[in-house]
Image: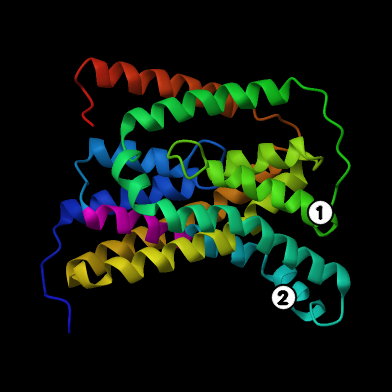
Amino acid sequence: MPWPAEKTSMIEIIKAIILGVVEGFTEFLPISSTGHLILVGSLLDFNGPVSKTFEVFIQLGAILAVIWLYRQRIWQLAVRLPVDNQARRFVGGLFLAFLPAAILGLLFHNQIEQYLFNPITVAAALLVGGLVILVVENMVLRFRIQQMENVPPNTALGIGVAQAVSLIPGTSRSAATIVGGMLLGLDRRTAVEYSFFLSIPTMLAATLYDLAKSIRDLHSGDLVILAVGFIVAFMVAFFVIQYFLSYIQTHTFKLFAWYRIVLGVVVLLAFYSGVLQV
């Protein structure tokens, strides 16, 4: 059955552009893209079932930015896979890391969306995550792994367990996997790049799952909004990923931790003062 035609207003397109910028800017930084989309969506009055699909779908644009930037390494990995044990171990490790969030997401997807997709949960997760990052950054860590391909299966599974925590909106998938990776012995850049690669199967699966559930509820106007958000998210993420990789060469994650804490406090104050509604 064809989608019913419905005209898309310029206001909706502007909202899609804003949210695409937010997604592309925050997806790979340890500050929670989902949390920011929930907060900005609330401020823009962009709510309802279509908004949830939109928030998931535009993440695909950000993921394609990763695929494009790492296209040579992904191609080399695919070529080596049939004959190289290290390549097979790396891909197998990614699959193990993918499983915890995938299983828990399938089991509790509806409950998470119903009870946790709100500004208060986001604020609490931002605060807790910021404090965790500060604690980890002040620990003396021993980095045993300086290349993604050397991540053993048990370490990959540990990173996957950390990623599963990010099902709580506001936690940040990037923060959970990066911090988890560092605690398990990955150096800073390797933890970030492993987080990038793990995002590919994780977010592709989330996008396809959500679209399969909601595609019948979309109309032609929604397709325009999805396309706009997708393209904007891709372009912004493309530049943010490169800057982030450069930034971590000489900086810690403390700036992001303090940003999370300040934002969490602001959200709580806005809620309790009545400015922000759940």
Query: Label 2 belongs to which residue?
Result: 75
Mark 1 sits on what residue?
151
* Residue 23 percent coordinates (x, y): 43, 48
Residue type beneath disc 1: Val
Residue 174 quadrant: top right
Measured along the vertical axis of the image, is residue 114 above or below residue 273? below
Check disc 2: other Cα within 10 Å, few if <14, some if 14-19, many if 20+.
few
Q: For label 1, count other residues whose C-alpha is less than 10 Å away and answer few (under 14), some (14-19) or many (20+).
A: many
Residue found at the far front of this picture? 107
Q: Residue at x 19, y 41 (%)?
A: 45
| Rendering coords of residue 119 (x, y %) | 32, 32
Which amino acid type is marked by label 2? Trp
**Location of residue 195 in the rendering, given as x and y in whole percent from the top left corner:** 65, 50
Asked which secondary structure carries label 2, the reply is: helix
Counting every numbered tag in the picture gives 2
Look at the image and tell me in which quarter the C terminus lies.
Answer: top left
Residue 209: which numbered mark, if any? none
Indicate left or right for 219 with 90 as reference.
left
Q: Was residue 53 drawn as part of the magenta stretch in this picture?
A: yes
The answer to whether the residues at label 2 and label 1 have Cβ atoms under 8 Å apart is no
Please name the residue shown 40% across and 27% down the image: 123
Image point 36% across, 63% down: which residue?
210
Pick the front one: 176 or 187? 176
Question: Can residue 254 be seen at all in this image of the molecule?
Answer: no
Instruction: Tell whether 65 sits left or right of 24.
Output: right
Q: Position of residue 58 (x, y in %)?
A: 40, 58
In percent of the image, x 50 and y 52: which residue is there? 104
Magenta part of the chain: 49-61
Name the secondary structure under disc 1.
loop
Judge whether residue 49 can be spotted in this image.
yes
Instruction: Give the CA separation, mark 2 to mark 1.
Output: 19 Å
